[in-house]
Image (cartoon, rainbow, N blue to C red):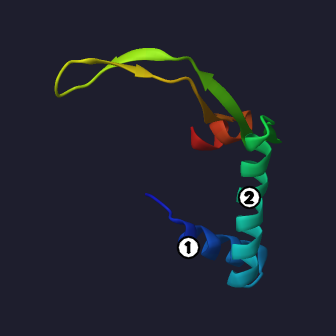
Amino acid sequence: MSVNKTELIDEIAKSADISKASAARALDAVIEAVTTTLKHDGTVTLAGFGTFAVGSRAARVGRNPRTGAEIQIAASKTPKFKPGKALKDAVN
């Protein structure tokens, strides 16, 4: 089963007994707050749910799959998520 943003908004609105517009604004605010924090190399910890953080990838040499030629891949930052115990337990 997969849930898209619209379906998630519907679930939030129903669960919190608020309008879909309010649920959409709340979800957008959460996403923006997490994004802004990660942009500034911070972490966001939601107790029982998990932690959003920024990880680093070192520069490395890769290969073009078509030609086999070596290419340089630059170092980069990537968002990471580590699930909390309560989320892991709920899934299992």
Q: Which quarter of the picture shows residue 11?
A: bottom right
Q: Residue at x 56, y 17 (%)?
A: 58
The relative height of residue 41 versus residue 1 in the rendered view (above or below) is above
Few, some or many residues within 10 Å of mark 1 (<14, 14–19, 20+): few
Q: Which residue is mark 1?
A: 6
Q: In the displayed structure, does residue 9 sit left or right of residue 66?
A: right
Q: Which residue is mark 2?
A: 32
Residue 73: image location, x then y, percent: 44, 23
Residue 80: mark: none
Q: In the displayed structure, does residue 67 sit left or right of residue 86?
A: left
Name which residue type carries label 1. Answer: Thr
Q: Secondary structure at mark 1?
A: helix
Name which residue type carries label 2. Answer: Glu
Q: Residue at x 63, y 34 (%)?
A: 80
Q: Earlier in the sequence, mark 2 or mark 1?
A: 1
Q: Residue at x 52, y 17 (%)?
A: 59
Residue 49: image location, x then y, percent: 73, 43
The relative height of residue 40 versus residue 32 in the rendered view (above or below) is above
> What's the CA distance linking mark 2 and mark 1?
17 Å
Q: Image quadrant for the C terminus?
A: top right
The relative height of residue 61 versus residue 34 in the rendered view (above or below) is above
Which tag is nearer the camera, tag 2 or tag 1? 2
Residue placed most toward the observer, 27 or 7:
27
Numbered-mark total? 2
Q: Residue at x 50, y 24 (%)?
A: 74
Few, some or many residues within 10 Å of mark 2 (<14, 14–19, 20+): few
Q: Secondary structure at mark 2?
A: helix
Residue placed most toward the observer, 52 or 67:
67
